[in-house]
Image (spheres, rainbow, N blue to C red):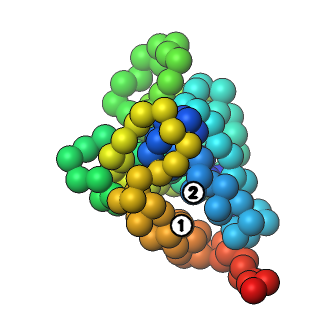
Amino acid sequence: MKRALIIGFGSEIRGDDAFGPQVAYELQDRVHPEVVVETCQGLTPDIALTISEVDIVIFVDCAVGPEPGKINHQLITPSDDKSLSMVHFLSPESLLTWCGSLYGKLPEAHVFTVTGKCYDISNSLTEPVLNAFPQVVEQVLSLLAQNGLPGHKVMSHA
């Protein structure tokens, strides 16, 4: 069975930037037990070891752009920058470069982003990002199912 990792990243107190962690929290109880779900404020080099131990990694983040609520899904590859300079935060592509260079492993990697509207101090998502939220959750679950890791059924207690 494939091993998978979901990383939701962003600041949980900066409005729409909390999208990645909030999606990760939603997925926590809905994914196959073999899927590891983590959250962080930013991607740092120490995450490369965890990524090297899985077959598929899925990053979830909020993006800056002109169309709030727009969903983007990309299959990503390592960055062309092979310098491995020490930085505080990395892009998913740079983190893959670290993973390949340090551990000789490159899992299949995807990134899901939604364009945000507001990054002010806040603990809530804006309407366009909230509207995209369930679609991204379902797209991540679908990608996992395509890789042999179907999610759990969520039972309603209503």
Disc 1 marks a residue whose amino acid type is: Val
Task: Quickly name the residue at label 2.
Answer: 23
**Eyeballing the image, is 86 above or below 12?**
above
Q: Is the C-beta separation of discs 2 and 1 under 8 Å?
A: yes
Foreground residue, 9 or 44?
9
**Eyeballing the image, is 42 above or below 33?**
above
* Image coords of residue 73 (percent x, y): 38, 59
Q: Residue 137: which disc?
A: 1
Q: Residues within 10 Å of mark 1 (few under 14, many from 20)?
A: some
Quadrant holding the N terminus: bottom right
* Image coords of residue 2 (percent x, y): 68, 64
Q: CA distance from mark 2 to mark 1?
A: 6 Å
Say which element carries label 1: helix
* Image coords of residue 124 (percent x, y): 52, 48
Q: Quadrant of residue 104?
A: top right
**Eyeballing the image, is 49 above or below 32?**
above
Q: Is 40 on the left-hand or right-hand side of 36? A: left
Quadrant holding the C terminus: bottom right
Disc 2 marks a residue whose amino acid type is: Val
Foreground residue, 86 or 25?
25
- How many numbered marks does the figure carry? 2
Say which element carries label 2: helix
* Image coords of residue 120 (percent x, y): 42, 34
